[in-house]
Image (cartoon, rainbow, N blue to C red):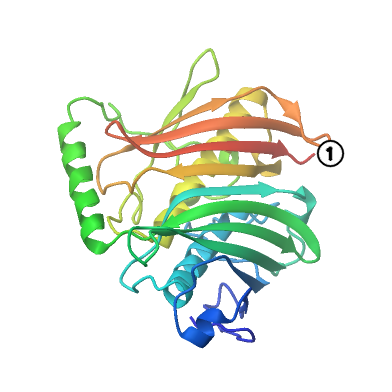
Amino acid sequence: MTADTMSTTAREPEYGARRLIHRPTSWEHYLLDAPGSGEEHFVLAGSLPAGHPLPDGGPGRFHEPQHLAGELREIGEFVAHQYFGVPRERLGAFSRLVLAVTDVAAWRVVGPRPPRVTTCLAVRPRPAAGRVPRGLGFDVEVSVGDVPGCTGEGELLFPAPAQQRGRIAYGRRAVRAARAREAAPEDAVLPVAPGEVGRRSPAAVLLGEPALSAQGRLTTWVLPRAGWPAADAPGDGAADGLLLEALRQASVLTAGRAFGYDAALALVADWDVRFRGPAQAGPPVRCVAVPGLLDKDADGRPSVPVTLTLTQRQRTVAQARTRVVQDL
């Protein structure tokens, strides 16, 4: 991927052609041929990603904003390598991602083609002991067509390969040590009905039938699937996508079981996800979701917050707070 103030880059078919434009606040690093040290601004124009990590997992009523995560990670890696001097062998891994839908109607599916989106990014290096930043923080504003549709922020970390190997080894030891302390499902896990998580095909379901407490706490297991939990490597876009899809499905399922939401009309409008470390291949992943109080959004739609935790052998993989709206 290359970019400058007037670059156009052809991407994979599911993305279409997109243009990444650098809007420098200073030309200093061009004149000195030095990595940037302050905030840099970029604009990405193109179509909303239409691909999905699951079969038959494409949009129903909505284009889903979590699809932006893979795009933001990819752009973050490119910007880190191209503009901030991060070595190319260092891949990015989210530590936090926040997305907030500002116009639900803008995300409705209209017509056979994905809409054009414009993503404005302000990117800042996170300081480290040396000249190479340990990560990047970013703010994002997304317009769908001409409508402001989403705002967000996040952080990508770029650990050195040796540091990453150390984290992986520690995670494996922790998984082995905890095997006796957290039970796996005793019986075969039956998947929930696709319609309960807003999907059409059983092949797109990531969650097993949950247990629901009297207080509304939902506990379930993530169904095994090739590609996730998997990747010991950071920066795995497919793993990111599956993790966010598991959180989306759990949020929608919780809203349906607790408050009778129609999953086909449900949109996860707010995301605040903290990534605690990659899941390991093999051991099962447990999901706990707790609904908050039912309320209404600014346009009068039913709105419910959900708090979620994904764990694997008592080790937290991700924690999230989401908000699910019902688009009646």
Q: Residue at x 56, y 34 (%)?
A: 253
Please determine whether, in this image, residue 29 is positioned above or below residue 48: below
Along the line of sight, the residue nearer the viewer: 212 or 134: 134
| Residue 262 to residue 63: above or below | above
Is there any visible trace of residue 108 in the rendered image? no
Q: Nearer the viewer, residue 93 or 249?
A: 93
Answer above or below: position of 300 versus 77: above
Is 51 in front, or is 150? 150
Q: Is residue 16 visible?
A: yes
* Outermost top residue: 214
Label 1 environment density (alpha carbons within 10 Å; few <14, some 14–19, many ≥20): few
Residue at 67% from the left image edge and 27% from the top image edge:
260
Residue located beneath label 1 in the image? 299
**Quadrant in the rendering for residue 207:** top left
| Rendering coords of residue 178 (x, y %) | 20, 31
**What amino acid is labelled 1 in the image?**
Asp
Residue 305: percent from the left, percent from the top?
A: 63, 31
Disc tally is 1
Q: Nearer the viewer, residue 314 or 220?
A: 314
Direction from residue 265 to residue 10 in the image, left or right: left
Q: Quadrant of residue 323?
A: top right
Kindly indicate the quadrant of the structure image that contains residue 135: bottom left
